């Protein structure tokens, strides 16, 4: 049968020898109404208890330096924590060391996955931005070429325009390296921006 993370914790602490009264109270409360979400999904540990018992638990957790929150629900009180560090502390308090190790492993896995996703999203956004900018540049160059020909541009702009047309997927750095003499990325960007401005001015004049 599939074991949830909560049932794994409950099974582990059921065999614990009573330590301090405070630790024992936390263990008992978890056995009575505790749940903890698999950290791969979210960070959430809760105790669903009668109001008086919940008050005892809140006081005890605060004695351990934790910051539990409460929610009244169906004549019961839900005592919960949503910070990963504090959930780890509760597992440690209850003596659920194997579960604590599993929790931390899954936590690291989740944070690594989130970091990778953020990097991929950032790289995708940058790529989209570059592609959009390149297309705008190519459209501006094509417009000038169709209207008056690229010879209308000053030589330094004309050289960049032709390279952008011939190498539509090249980066600004790569275009700069193709020029003679080579030009910095910011220099290429400046010239392409000037070309776009010329195209916009021509469009306004044409209207």
Image (cartoon, rainbow, N blue to C red):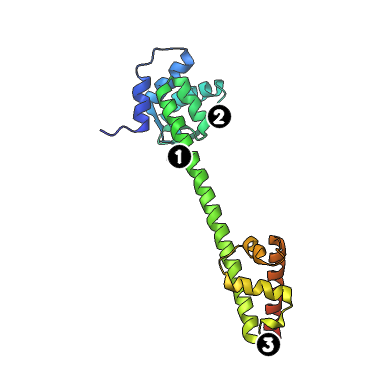
Mark 1 vs 2: CB contact within 8 A: no
Q: Is residue 14 above or below residue 148?
A: above
Quarter assignment of residue 153: bottom right
Reading the image, the residue beneath label 1 is: 42
Mark 1: secondary structure: loop
Task: Compare marks 3 and 1 and give the one earlier in the sequence.
Answer: 1
Where is residue 144 shown, x and y percent of the image?
65, 81
Q: Is disc 2 in contact with disc 3, using a CB cutoff of under 8 Å?
A: no
Which residue is labeled 3 in the image?
A: 206
Residue 8 vs residue 78: left or right?
Answer: left
Marked residue nearer the N-terminal end (2 or 3): 2
What residue is at 36 percent from the left and 22 percent from the top?
A: 12
Residue at 53% from the left image edge and 48% from the top image edge: 118
Can residue 44 be seen here? The reply is no
Q: Residues within 10 Å of mark 2 (few under 14, many from 20)?
A: some
- Closer to the camera: disc 1 or disc 2? 1
Please name whichever residue, 192 or 28, is drawn nearer the observer in this view of the structure.
Answer: 192
Query: Where does residue 88 sit, x and y in percent of width and height?
Result: 49, 27
> Looking at this rendering, what residue extends furthest in the left direction?
1
The reply to whether the C-beta atoms of the residues labelled 3 and 1 are less than 8 Å apart is no
Which numbered tag is attached to residue 67? 2
Q: Nearer the viewer, residue 114 or 33?
A: 114
**Picture quarter with the N terminus:** top left
């Amino acid at each position: 049968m599939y074991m949830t993370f909560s049932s794994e914790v409950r099974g582990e602490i059921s065999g614990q020898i009573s330590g301090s009264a405070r630790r024992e109270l936390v263990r008992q409360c978890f056995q009575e109404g505790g749940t903890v979400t698999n950290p791969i999904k979210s960070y959430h540990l809760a105790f669903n208890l009668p109001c008086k018992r919940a008050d005892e638990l809140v006081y005890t957790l605060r004695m351990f330096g934790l910051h539990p929150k409460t929610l009244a629900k169906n004549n019961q009180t839900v005592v919960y924590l949503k910070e990963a560090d504090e959930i780890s502390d509760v597992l440690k308090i209850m003596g659920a060391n194997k579960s604590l190790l599993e929790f931390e492993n899954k936590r690291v896995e989740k944070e690594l996955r989130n970091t990778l996703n953020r990097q991929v999203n950032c790289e995708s956004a940058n790529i989209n931005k570059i592609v959009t900018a390149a297309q705008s540049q190519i459209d501006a160059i094509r417009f000038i070429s169709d209207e008056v020909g690229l010879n209308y541009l000053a030589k330094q702009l004309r050289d960049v325009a032709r390279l952008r047309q011939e190498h539509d997927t090249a980066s600004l750095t790569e275009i700069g390296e193709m020029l003679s003499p080579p030009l910095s990325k910011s220099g290429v960007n400046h010239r392409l921006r000037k070309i776009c401005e010329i195209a916009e001015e021509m469009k306004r004049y044409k209207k």
